[in-house]
Image: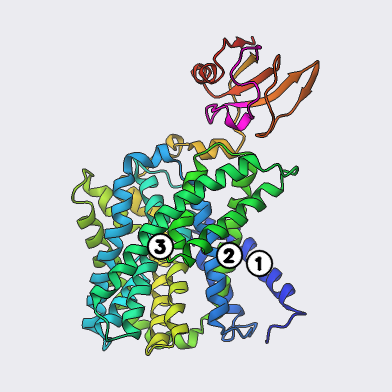
Amino acid sequence: MVLTTENILLIGSLLLFISIVIGKTSSRFGVPTLLLFLTIGMIAGSDGLAGIKFDNQQIAQFIGIVSLNFILFSGGLDTNWNTVKPIVREGVVLSTLGVLLTAVSLGLFVHWLTDFTIYESLLLGSIVSSTDAAAVFSILRSKSIALKANLRPTLELESGSNDPMAYVLTISFLTLVINQDQSLVSILPMFLLQMILGAIAGFGFGVLSKYLINNIKLGFEGLYPVLVIALMFITFSATDSLGGNGFLAIYICAVYLGNQDLINKKTILKMYDGLAWLMQIILFLTLGLLVFPSEVMPFMGIGLLISLFLIFIARPLAVFISLIPFKMKLKRRFFISWVGLRGAVPIVFATYPLIAGIDKADMMFNIVFFISVTSVLLQGTSLSLVAKWLKVDLPEDQKIVTEYDRFITNSPKSVLHEVHVTDNCIAIGSKVVSLGFPKSAVIAMIKRNDHFITPDGSTIIEPNDILVVLSDHEKDFDQISNCLKQKIVEVR
């Protein structure tokens, strides 16, 4: 079937509906939903039942880049700095040195196993060197896996921040494959420029985005998520045009924004959570349509060998070497090694050699596709079992509810106070979003001139306001008192 303007919406919506329904039921059987999305795309493709013809690598790459923007940005918004701060060094080392070691060790194995040149081998290793944020986020959350210590934030920080490193390595070795007269040293300036500019631009755009979100009066709550989408794409494209790493920039920007007080923040977070799922489904469906199973079959043998080497040797080797300077129990290192899921990101990166038209690009793409499927199928389905076997999981009743979960789910509050705003209160004239209240405290309503109003982040505090504040803990009100510099009146 050839896609036309008349049937693309019908086909797309049907595939989306089928993916959501089947994905909902698949978790009962322990099958990763992302793998099902990919399978549905393959079934609908040229070699499948629907026979939809789709072989445009440029469009697939565009969809992949747009989807990764949403997925990485959503993952950054979910990242609580207080949670990841104790393990930020481990996460950064895993997402940089760990990715490099994975790419090099796998590249050397591919060079020994195949007739690929050393740069072609390292290119293949770079493409599959990072763990997939979409795969890790979705599987950890859909399976509600509770992990001991700081394992979960370590895994999420690594998977959310290591795609930029893999992207830079992919582009670097692709440049060397195309320009074989260049040396390895020649790509170092580009590598450093990508990472340094990406980090600086990400933080800078984060600060600018916070200012714009909290100071532009849009009038409608629904426009604030739209504003954030615009700022996200500006961050990515502007950084990329300057020669920096756009993926790194949007992740850092999102982490910064996720830990700030923003107007209508809850609306923004909820919308991005839904959009991240939508983009994951679209991305996997698109890549499923792009793949021709008949072309993958001839490479199953070599793909399986490379995949097994990646899972059982390259990934553990990279993790153990990277974590040498840090104190961590052996079982936790093994579990981090096992959570090395490869998903859609390597397949997206594999489109770069295809578009560049290098030799063996088709072979690389099919091998990468097989590696991703094998990883999600083998590692994704066994995370719970491996966590129990290594004894790094927590009982369900001890599962830690994160600050992010409490924030977006309207968790019940246990303490109620009234705060009277006196004439000398320093908060007068300030927006609610700038008060600096604890994350677990909310202003449920404001009594003003015998009327009650429901505030949002842009509401201005006025003299003689009575703030009805709900919170999870009594101790929160000491911080609230400091924010307002006045005595709090408790309601019994």
- Placement of 385 over or under 50, stated as above or below: above
Q: Quadrant of residue 182?
A: bottom left
Amino acid bearing label 2: Ile
The residue identified by callout 1 is: 16
Label 2 CA crowd tier, 10 Å (few <14, some 14–19, many 20+): many
Q: What residue appears at the point 59 percent right and 46 percent down from the top-left corner?
A: 269
Percent across and percent down for residue 239 are 48, 61
Q: What residue appears at the point 33 percent right and 57 percent down from the top-left corner?
A: 95
The residue identified by callout 3 is: 163
Label 3 CA crowd tier, 10 Å (few <14, some 14–19, many 20+): many
Circle on res. 281: 2
Looking at marks 1 and 3 on the same chain, the residue that comes earlier in the sequence is marked by 1
Cβ atoms at labels 1 and 3 below 8 Å apart: no
- Placement of 206 over or under 54, stated as above or below: above
Q: What residue appears at the point 46 percent right and 64 percent down from the top-left corner?
A: 242
| Span shown in magenta | 421-442
Q: Secondary structure at mark 3?
A: helix
Percent across and percent down for residue 155 are 37, 51
Circle on res. 479: none
- Between 450 and 8, which is closer to the camera in this rendering? 450
Cβ atoms at labels 3 and 2 below 8 Å apart: no
Percent across and percent down for residue 230 are 62, 56
Rounded to the nearest angstrom, the CA distance separating label 3 from label 2 is: 19 Å
Looking at marks 2 and 1 on the same chain, the residue that comes earlier in the sequence is marked by 1
Give the total number of marks visible in the rendering.
Answer: 3
Residue 408 colored in magenta in the image? no
Percent across and percent down for residue 334 are 26, 54
- Placement of 460 over or under 289, stated as above or below: above
Cβ atoms at labels 2 and 1 below 8 Å apart: yes
Q: Quadrant of residue 305?
A: bottom left
